[in-house]
Image (spheres, coloured by chain):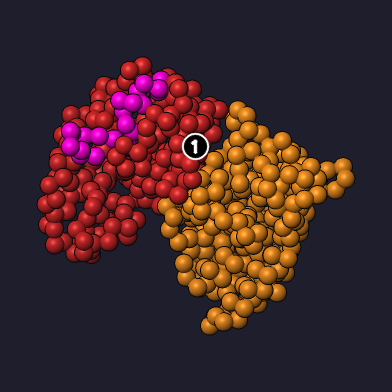
Chain colours: A red, B orange
Amino acid sequence: MTARIIDGKAVAARVRAEVARDVAALDRVPGLATLLVGDDPASAIYVRNKRRLCVEAGMADLHRHLPGDVSQAELAAVIDELAADPDVTGILLQLPLPGHLDAAPLIARIPADKDVDGLTEVSAGRLALGRPGLRPCTPSGVMVLLDEAGVDLAGAEAVVVGRSDLVGKPQGALLLARNATVTTCHSRTRDLAAVCRRADVLVVAAGRPGLIGADAVKPGAVVIDVGIHRGEHGLVGDVRTAEVAEVAGAITPVPGGVGPMTIAMLLRNTVTAAKGL
Amino acid sequence: MTARIIDGKAVAARVRAEVARDVAALDRVPGLATLLVGDDPASAIYVRNKRRLCVEAGMADLHRHLPGDVSQAELAAVIDELAADPDVTGILLQLPLPGHLDAAPLIARIPADKDVDGLTEVSAGRLALGRPGLRPCTPSGVMVLLDEAGVDLAGAEAVVVGRSDLVGKPQGALLLARNATVTTCHSRTRDLAAVCRRADVLVVAAGRPGLIGADAVKPGAVVIDVGIHRGEHGLVGDVRTAEVAEVAGAITPVPGGVGPMTIAMLLRNTVTAAKGL
């Protein structure tokens, strides 16, 4: 193996420590309202981790747990209450919601300045227009990893595989804002490996285990693997890490790469919201 | 010359005729409020053309002309009045504004459902997230020209030169929504000609006269020139049309290419707003 491993766990810990220092310097303790509906076990674990790290960073845990049969109107009313509450700095509606609820109009009720997940139309527009705003956590975390890896993004060829609202599309916008030449690929891209081989920076968020192999990587490229899947032998990403590590200059592992960054960036967003955008 | 010329004037006339048919079929006449501040001669001409074609398409011309020394608060109040007026389907704030006015917070007062220029944060977010919304007129017009030229966008390599909020960035989003593999280039791109040569579809919106020559065009590519500049010998675009036309499969002229599409798409947006998004 030749590639340097980008240690997301260590970087995330550093970001959380910075957040804790920022929180300590604020006049008022920021509060994060995580909103969990129903009893999905995976969602419960995610929310528990967010709450724990929120408290570790010195912020107020303003969690709300609503029953799985809550109505759309009741949930909307809770969001409106949190939106109006000056103690609530950030609102995170844990997804997915139970099937009888419609997520989009609920997310739309979160004020952009409290939208610490960066999921509202206004937050997406602020990113698209290059204005101050709260950015989606996973692609922001990728940017921090690229900076930690010492990547010079200006003028670099960046290729993003995947065009989800949560990762691919905001990732492209963030890379473009840093002056990379950005290509976005997806399932309809004709020769995916050929396009990926152009990349100085390759961010893979396709949601397909092992999609990217060594044939799709330029020697020396920095490869960020956003995928995470439960495989036969443990967790795997969208990148075939072992073979790509023979070609790439640097690579994130799965687990321990992008994954830990997401909550760290959620906490950073909450501090950003507390400071005012 | 080998390239087919894409006749934007003819396509724009067809779009306007479609808009007029749509207007005739509506129960209620849509109204377009163009808002002109001060006496900039170029802005006056643009607004006059918009009003004329709006009336030709059967819509109500709800123009407002405000003195050049209007205050920020007064202009904001006019926009709020138009926003609340059910007879006003679309609001267009003609830019640039006189120097003492701050455009961004004024644009932000335009409700996204009346934002026929597609300039608000919410409209940009809706585009980024692939949701129904009003799109910026010039890049939407480019999409119509590509369709008229019979381009199969799915899986095509599309390259956009320029990353402005008005054209380059929304253009990339629109091409991606149509399943092209999209690369966005800009002034920091290292080897612009090499990147452009990959393009099956090349959209140039760099704002630099004659930037793109034949060396940057793949044989048979479709080239759309968004630039328009007053040169020594009349209007010129960002593309050196004569030499590129020897290589490209199809090309828009300047003038008579993208230019006429912008107002046509403004009118189409107004009808879209009237129908409900």
* Residue appearing at x 54%, y 74% in the figure: B87
Compared to residue B59, the image places residue A168 above or below, namely above
Magenta segment includes B242: no
The three-letter amino acid code for the residue at tag 1 is Val
Horizontal side of residue A140 vs B77, given as left or right: left
Q: Is residue A67 visible?
A: yes
- Residue A244 included in the magenta stretch of the image: yes
Residue A131: image x %, image y %?
Answer: 48, 41
User: Viewer-proximal residue, A97 or B111?
Assistant: A97
Q: Is residue A28 left or right of residue A143?
A: left
Residue A16 visible = no
Q: Point out residue B137 in the picture as x, y percentages from the top left corner.
A: 60, 57
Against B53, is B203 above or below?
A: above
* Residue drawn at 29 percent across, 39 percent down: A209
Say above or below: B254 vs B265: above
- x and y, in percent, of residue A50 in the image: 20, 37
Identify the residue at image location x=27%, y=46%: A91
Q: Which residues are magenta?
A: A229-252
Mark 1 residue element: helix
